Image (cartoon, grey):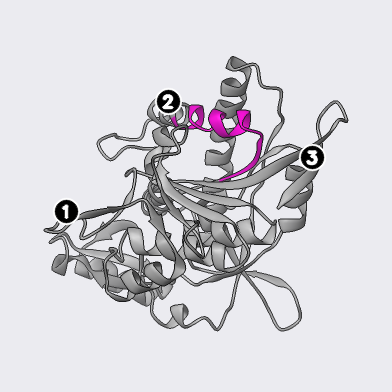
Amino acid sequence: MQHLVFDLNNNLTMNKLAVVALGGNALLRGNQVGTIEEQEQNTTDTLENLVYLIKEGYDLVISHGNGPQVGNILMRNDAGEEMYGIPQMPLDICVADSQGGIGYMIERMLRNVLKKHGINKEVCCLVTPVIVDKNDPAFQNPTKRVGKIYNKAQADALTASKGWVFKDEVKDTGTGWRRVVPSPKPVGILNEKVINQLVRQGIIVIAAGGGGVPVYIDEVGDIRPSEAVIDKDSASSLLANRIGADEFYILTDVSYVYINYKKPGEKKLEFLNKVDTDKYLKEGMFGEGNMAPKIRSCLQFVENGGKMSVITEATKLADMSYGTKITLEYED
């Protein structure tokens, strides 16, 4: 879908619209401690790669992960309560906190990158509530790990005092107990109309960070917070569909999707259609802890009207020979 857009000089243009989901490594590398200097440099390096899309005439909505950052916020919650008796903030507030901080950093770094390249575009960051179904089965089976690791006595005490649910990390990592929260499916973007209006004016919008702030609508129509974490790629895919995006990009730490990744018979996939994607998912060819949710989000996008999804590494965006392209059907 091409959008009729008025630029800042009130000239009518027709641009493609892409939603770009930045992976966690776009902000913080695995071998780093997470200083603001490190995160700002990583963010700048990643955003440099988006200049290609902007110069190609794309309007952009940018989403991002927040795993390390919201984890740090939760640990600050713990430390503040233990040392000073400061009341803990609920998970939705922590996600909103991370959205605002990360979004501000992306906006500031992006403004500097645009200035460097002589590109005259406005940038806007929106704290984005994302609606979930309060009856989603995920609420009966919390799986998403958050916060720090506790010993058994601490975990039991927190279960008794706060009702938190914990998973035995010893079985997986030998380290202790960690809180788990639900990860429900996103069903709506609360301020999608605002995002759509802004991007149709040619403004680059940063939205749905960390999967969005999880909320649900109660019996009287009020917006209520949800103690949950929404998958970032799933929320980004939904947003892309709801605003009529042409393309959906997930930027991760590999240039392609593989089957039998790091196993005998490893194979690079440059193109995927729905039939093959469904087949590989059913066969368990993609890791459930990393690539499978991304694949499902990309498939969801093209199944609901999107033209193409792409999974690749940020530095490969300018070379269209890289990246796995997911479409409904293979192109002739």
| Kind of residue indicated by mark 3 | Gln
In the depicted structure, whether residue 24 falls above or below residue 261: above
Q: Which mark is drawn over residue 201?
A: 3
Label 1 to label 2: alpha-carbon separation: 30 Å
Tag on residue 262? 1
The residue lying toward the viewer, choosing from 179 and 192, is: 192
Residue 192 image point, x, y percent:
71, 57
Q: CA distance from mark 3 to mark 2?
A: 29 Å
* Up/down of 131 relative to 48, above or below: below
Residue at label 2? 41
Q: CA distance from mark 1 to mark 3?
A: 44 Å
Determine which quarter of the picture holds residue 162: bottom left
Q: Hey, which residue is sitting farthest right in the picture? A: 10
The magenta segment is: 46-62
- Tell me if I can see residue 181 in this picture: no
Q: Secondary structure at mark 2?
A: helix
Marks 3 and 2, the one that precedes in the sequence: 2
Looking at the rendered structure, the number of numbered marks drawn on it comes to 3
Res. 193 in view: yes
Q: Please determine whether, in this image, residue 286 is positioned above or below residue 18.
A: below
Q: Categorize mark 1 by other alpha carbons within 10 Å: few (<14), some (14-19), many (20+).
A: few
Circle 2: is it few (<14), some (14-19), or many (20+) Cα within 10 Å? some
